[in-house]
Image: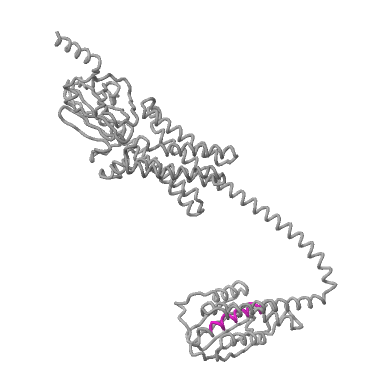
Amino acid sequence: MTHIKIIVFLFFTTFLYSNTLKLDNTVSQIDVLSNSSIYIDYTNKLNLNDIKNKNVLFKENKKSILGYGYSPSFTVWVKFTLQNTTDKVLHKILEYDNTLTTNIMFYDDNKIYKDGLLDLNKDRQTTNPTFDINLNSNESKTYYLKLSSSVTTLILKLKLWDNDEFYSKEIYHQFALALFFGAMSILIIYNLFIYFFTKDKSYLYYVLYIFGMTIHHLVYVGIAFIYILEPIWIIYVVKSASLIVALPIFGLAMFTKYFLNIEQYSKLNMILNWLLVLMFISIVIFFLNDSFDAYRNVMSIVTSVYLIYITLYSAIKKNQQAYFILLGRFIIFLAFIFMFLSSQGIFSIYDYIKYFIEISFITEAIIFSIALSDKINKLQIERNNANANLLEQQNSEKERLKMKVDEKTSDLKIALEEKGLLLKELNHRVKNNMQTIVSLIRLQCDEIEDKKYIDILKTIQNRINAMSHLHEMLYQNDHISHINANDYFFMLIDELQDSFSRDIKVKFDISVVLKSEEAVYCGLIFNELVTNSFKYAFPNKKGCITIKLYNQDNKIKFVVSDNGIGYDQSNKKDSLGLILIDTLVKQQFKGDIVTHSNDGVKVEISWDAK
């Protein structure tokens, strides 16, 4: 009697919970999970023989997707039966539509096939684990899947595909993912270039955020496992799951901080800094100890929620950029909600919009890029307004000054004679002030022992003296429009000889009277060239320098030459003095300069006589 009951029980169990899928060549894809039976092993110890011999009770499943969340404490067994209703051999592909499950075992009679993150098939070129199904004509066969996930969420979704249809789908899928990652890469490179040009930290952390999102999604969709990482590295990726999740959150936090200028809200900024520190500490803890893996994303989630709060607060404070960030965060938040619903088996957005997550990421990245562009536009508008205000102020000031000049001109015409006296007094005072500066430099030289600094101060002193002597001559002469170049150069050479204590002869051949505005430039050029000769041309401290200033063919010729050791122009390094000479000749005189350095040094300068 007992045997009869067992047989009846097994009969009804088989009738109730076995749902045979009948196959032919007309269907390209079939949902297997909704036609299968499920058994959950809470002991994590049962094998296939135990499943068959102990007559465990499988429960019929009608859902096309099952989500168990983070579930390392049990193993899920899936049982399904396929029947070939044709007279030909059928070749199908069973796709396990979740690339993140860590352990998958497929039983085909006595054959066992393994796949999953921790047992990755090295020959696999598909984003999801796949298994070959081969059925002879009119054959019926029962298959088993043993599924567990010790690190990631356990999500079940099984489809049976026709070979050609599957690979067509897979090629399209990987092409779409390639476009997505290509777009993300372009955004990274584009914004990185903008950072190098603008040095705005917002762009740098935005690049870090997009980079983190890209790394996360490469792992999430399985591209990293089949094209980038060797199988030996996968265990480290799994162990670093908290870091992969936290990296884009950190980039987003720093981007939000600088882009919305959160530092102006001291309390909010302090809390954000502490959250980032705690997130870093949690990453280290989860990397060293996997006992708390169920909570590894808590700090990242808390930080993400806090960033939404900060963005809302900034939006309330009328920060226009916060509106863009808020919109982008809403889109990503919506994507995460759908990802969570899918992981729990409640609702799969992918059945309606296959690339919803990728579209969300790209949309958010574009919105953030628009926000950054808007910020640049606002800064440009502010700069243009500031320039316009400055220009308006300059024009107003010019008008005011013009009126003042017109007003003063009539008074100056009456007191024309006083003008000369005033100019002389001015030159006298300028000369006195410059001499005061020279005296201060000399006093400073007395306190310095470093020869390099003494030479620098002497060079500065001689330059100031060159201008000081010009102002001295201007207030001593009756006519201030022209300067006797011969007297002026004699005054300068005396100063230089005293400064350098050289027994060097200086010859003058000067036949031109210089205009006062030309004299100041000639004095500086004279000072630099003769100083160079004193310092470098005569190692034995003896020699001759020749100074010529004459008018030839309506051009002023200014020649300074020495019979020193010369120098190799190919090894010449421009000093401040040489740069000063070149600038004065070309910018002030609009002239030309030629240097010869074969026998001594000869510098020829010419400009148009006016």
- In front of the other: 469 or 285: 285
**Place of residue 204 in the rendered image (x, y in percent of width and height, measured from the top left):** 46, 49
Q: How many numbered markers are drawn?
A: 0
Q: Is 497 situated left or right of 393 in this image?
A: left
**530, above or below 47, in the image:** below
- In front of the other: 283 or 83: 283
**Place of residue 428 in the rendered image (x, y in percent of width and height, measured from the top left):** 73, 79
Q: Is 367 situated left or right of 316 in this image?
A: left
Residue lying farthest top? Answer: 1
**Place of residue 261 in the rendered image (x, y in percent of width and height, measured from the top left):** 55, 46
What is the basis of the colouring in this image? Answer: one colour
**Place of residue 588 in the rendered image (x, y in percent of width and height, measured from the top left):** 62, 73
**Is residue 215 at all visible to an observer of this figure?**
no
- In front of the other: 408 or 304: 304
Q: Quadrant of the C terminus?
A: bottom right
Residue 520 inside the magenta-drawn segment: yes
**610, above or below 363, in the image:** below
Q: Quadrant of the N terminus?
A: top left
Instruction: Identify which residue is drawn at 75% across, 81% down.
Output: 479
Q: Is 246 situated left or right of 527 in this image?
A: left
Instruction: Identify which residue is drawn at 84% across, 69% down.
Output: 411
The image quarter containing residue 260 is top right
The image quarter containing residue 529 is bottom right
**Is residue 259 at all visible to an observer of this figure?**
yes
- In front of the other: 255 or 418: 255
Residue 58 inside the magenta-drawn segment: no
**350, above or below 442, in the image:** above
Q: Which residues are magenta?
A: 518-533
